[in-house]
Image: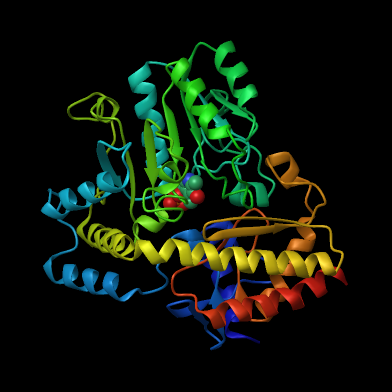
């Protein structure tokens, strides 16, 4: 029996389903990781895998990037938690504000869910309104008001509304189709009580779904006309799509922004930032409460400073190189699947892509749900067999990192060729 199998049997006894986040589970059992470096993971059985999951997008600079590790080691010598401010928090905030022109003030938190929860509460406090609008398939964290028609693990495990979640809360969340700004306009006009609109500017939690031509521009215009704060959830896209996220890439200014994942490149940190007049509603200056023991802790802060500094230093090459390799890989996989006559779609942008097994374009939740996810599971298992680890779900995304080499991309392409044959069988 493999060590991973043994560990999984053991894990199930003490951890529900053996995993600490549901997407990590897949049949028959997940591999257990011993260590990581650059673009690679080593499991407990000493197999080396090329990582295309990359901490669900967090590891834009790859595993154990040297600048980040040395910044953290340096910080460890000076302390890990102070419970009172430290100067590096200002340094990080200035870096974030420097990269994101829509952000005038920023508060640091720990996780993405905390960031979006704070952004939504801020919008409610600022507007004195109650309802929020989200889009089908967008994922904003695992709590009641956003776990409605959510993507990621919720879509994968067929949880449209979570048990234990309160209707009294989720009934205040109105859901609109992604890429449908007409529907948004109708819903905003109908309900007078909308506190905010929250959106992933590129939908990266339903597989990968790109915003159509004027979708984001229309969102900005409709929300402006109706005096409704617009929240860009850039937890995946921030720093990944460009140094200033999707908002810089598309040239659109939201009122509030949430960041996470690549912000800490593998360390626990997230942020909510935006217009000064909205951000200043936070306690103690304002009356919107938000607090956390570990927010702005010096270990995560020093990791994030190092991440942003490194990304900014490399930006002229980093983004164009990743975009080029991502497009090459996605187009090559597209060609292989076309030659094999496998009905499929492949969506890609920047350093992310995903394949869907369907003959119709995937532009929203409904069309993503129509793709054959059993075929995707076959693809996933075959890729893994060939040493390529992608997120184990149709409703996640393949993420590239700066640590990937040409030979990693060639290995991936060979593995996709094999895996698509298995899908066809
Ligand atoms: C991952 C993610 C979140 C939640 O972040 P956690 O750190 O897992 O709480 C929120 N929004 C988006 C777009 C995400 O991809």
User: In this rendering, does residue 27 appear at all?
Assistant: no
Front-lying residue, 134 or 184: 184
Examine the image and state in which quarter residue 388 appears.
bottom right
Image point 39% across, 42% down: which residue?
A: 258
Q: In this view, does 369 lie above or below 274?
A: below
In the rendered picture of this protein, how many numbered marks are placed on residues?
0
State which quadrant residue 268 falls in: bottom left
Q: Residue at x 59, y 34 (%)?
A: 135
Q: Nearer the viewer, residue 176 or 140?
A: 176
Look at the picture and state if 272 lies above or below 152.
above
Asked if 354 appears above or below 76 in the picture, the reply is above
Q: Which residue is drawn at 49% across and 75% down?
A: 404
Could you tell me if residue 222 is visible in this image? Answer: yes
Image position, residue 51 (x, y; %): 53, 73
Q: Residue 271, percent across and down?
A: 33, 45
Q: Is residue 261 left or right of residue 184?
A: left
Q: Where, quadrant-wise, is the C terminus in this rendering?
A: bottom right
State left or right for residue 148 relative to residue 89.
right
Q: Quadrant of the N terminus?
A: bottom right
Residue 116: x and y, percent?
Answer: 42, 39
Q: Is residue 371 left or right of residue 30?
A: right
Q: Which colour scheme is used?
A: rainbow
Picture layout, residue 425 above or below residue 134: below
């Amino acid at each position: 029996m493999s060590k991973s199998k043994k560990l999984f049997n053991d894990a199930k006894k003490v951890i529900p389903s053996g995993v600490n986040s549901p997407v990590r589970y897949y049949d028959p059992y997940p591999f257990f990781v011993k260590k990581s470096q650059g673009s690679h993971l080593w499991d407990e059985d000493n197999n080396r895998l090329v990582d295309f999951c990359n901490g669900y997008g967090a590891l834009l600079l790859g595993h154990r990037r040297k600048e980040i590790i040395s910044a953290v080691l340096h910080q460890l010598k000076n302390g890990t938690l102070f419970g009172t401010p430290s100067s590096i928090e200002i340094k990080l905030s200035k870096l974030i504000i420097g990269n994101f022109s829509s952000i005038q003030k920023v508060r640091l938190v720990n996780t993405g869910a905390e960031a979006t929860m704070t952004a939504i509460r801020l919008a409610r406090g600022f507007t004195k309104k109650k309802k929020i609008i989200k889009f089908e398939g967008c994922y904003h964290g695992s709590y009641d008001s956003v776990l409605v028609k959510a993507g990621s693990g919720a879509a994968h495990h067929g949880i449209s509304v979570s048990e234990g979640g309160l209707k009294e809360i989720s009934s205040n969340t109105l859901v609109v189709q992604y890429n449908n700004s007409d529907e948004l306009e109708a819903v905003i006009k109908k309900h007078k009580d909308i506190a905010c609109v929250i959106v992933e500017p590129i939908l990266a939690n339903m597989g990968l779904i790109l915003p159509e031509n004027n979708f984001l521009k229309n969102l900005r215009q409709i929300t402006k006309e109706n005096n409704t704060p617009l929240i860009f959830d850039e937890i995946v896209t921030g720093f990944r799509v460009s140094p200033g996220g999707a908002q810089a890439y598309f040239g659109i200014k939201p009122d509030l922004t949430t960041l996470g994942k690549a912000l800490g490149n593998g360390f626990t940190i997230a942020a909510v930032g935006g217009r000064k007049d909205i951000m200043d509603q936070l306690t103690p200056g304002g009356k919107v409460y938000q607090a956390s023991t570990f927010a702005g802790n010096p270990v995560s802060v020093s990791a994030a400073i190092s991440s942003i500094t490194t990304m900014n230093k490399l930006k002229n090459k980093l983004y164009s190189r990743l975009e080029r390799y991502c497009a090459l890989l996605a187009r090559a996989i597209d060609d292989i699947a076309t030659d094999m006559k496998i009905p499929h779609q492949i969506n890609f942008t920047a350093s992310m892509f995903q394949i869907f097994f369907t003959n119709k374009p995937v532009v929203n939740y409904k069309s993503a749900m129509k793709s054959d996810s059993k075929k995707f599971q076959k693809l996933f298992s075959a890729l893994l067999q060939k040493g390529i680890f992608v997120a184990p779900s149709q409703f996640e995304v393949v993420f590239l990192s700066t640590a990937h080499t040409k030979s990693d991309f060639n290995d991936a392409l060979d593995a996709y060729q094999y895996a698509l044959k298995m899908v066809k069988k």
